[in-house]
Image: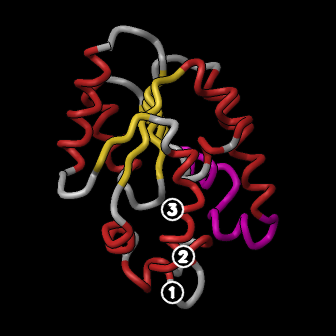
């Protein structure tokens, strides 16, 4: 990829944004940034931020980070699952990025986040039925995710997904 636009990976939790992003950064020889990991390194664990400060505070941290990253060039950015659905974040990142939405089936997502027990570590999946919560959240977010170029991650290795995105970036 010869331009300085960022490559942004968005999509629901468990679709492979972090794993694919790391590999894509290596393939494109670009720095990879995981927004959730960066927020955690600065402010502490996300579940703790949600519990102590609330979701609104967490979303404001995402907005500030989007503005910071938009000022840089040629990154591979793995976002939090809802980050690119925020109009303020989009205003910062979309003009300077190529955005791909990684998608997977609800069953794959539940498996990737660690089943029922792993889902308990995800604040938005807390409750008795994480599978139903995944389906509800996907239905709620699908219209926003549909605005980005979709990349299906089901039945594909992270490397295959990263190679697909790298090729798409080279073709344009």
Counting residues from the start of the chain, the first of labels 1 and 3 encountered is 1
Q: Secondary structure at mark 1?
A: loop
Q: Is residue 81 visible?
A: yes
Q: Residue at x 66, y 60 (%)?
A: 44
On the image, the x and y values in percent for residue 132 come to: 50, 79
Crowd class of label 3 (few under 14; some 14 to 19; many from 20; radius 10 Å): some
User: Mark number for residue 133?
Assistant: 2
Label 2, secondary structure: give it. Answer: helix
Q: Which residue is labeled 3 in the image?
A: 138
Q: In the rendering, at what x and y percent does residue 142 appear?
A: 52, 53
Q: Where's the N terminus, which quadrant?
A: top left
What secondary structure is marked by label 3? helix
The residue beneath circle 1 is 129
Q: Which residue is located at x 65 percent, y 32 percent?
A: 90
Q: Are marks 1 and 2 in contact (CB under 8 Å)?
A: yes
Q: Is residue 34 visible?
A: no
Characterize the local packing of mark 2: few (<14), some (14-19) or many (20 or more) Cα atoms within 10 angstroms. Answer: some
Question: Compared with residue 172, is residue 58 higher up or lower down, i.e. above or below?
Answer: below
Magenta span: 35-54
State whether the magenta stretch is mostly helix, strand or loop. Answer: helix
Quadrant assignment, res 28: top left
Magenta-colored stretch includes residue 49: yes
Residue 156 x, y percent position in the rendering: 18, 52
Looking at the rendering, in which quadrant would you find the C terminus? top left
């Amino acid at each position: 990829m010869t331009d300085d636009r960022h490559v942004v990976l968005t999509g629901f939790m468990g679709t492979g944004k972090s794993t694919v992003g790391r590999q894509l950064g290596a393939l494109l020889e670009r720095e990879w940034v995981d927004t959730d990991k960066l927020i955690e390194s600065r402010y502490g664990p996300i579940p703790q931020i949600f519990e102590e400060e609330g979701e609104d505070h967490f979303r404001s941290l995402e907005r500030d980070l989007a503005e910071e990253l938009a000022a840089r060039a040629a990154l591979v950015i793995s976002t939090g699952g809802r980050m690119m659905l925020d109009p303020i974040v989009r205003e910062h990142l979309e003009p300077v990025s190529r955005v791909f939405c990684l998608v997977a089936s609800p069953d794959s997502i539940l498996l990737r986040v660690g089943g029922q027990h792993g889902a308990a570590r995800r604040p938005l999946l807390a409750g008795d039925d994480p599978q139903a919560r995944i389906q509800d959240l996907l239905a709620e977010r699908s219209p926003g995710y549909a605005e980005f170029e979709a990349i299906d991650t089901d039945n594909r290795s992270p490397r295959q997904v990263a190679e697909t995105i790298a090729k798409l970036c080279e073709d344009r």
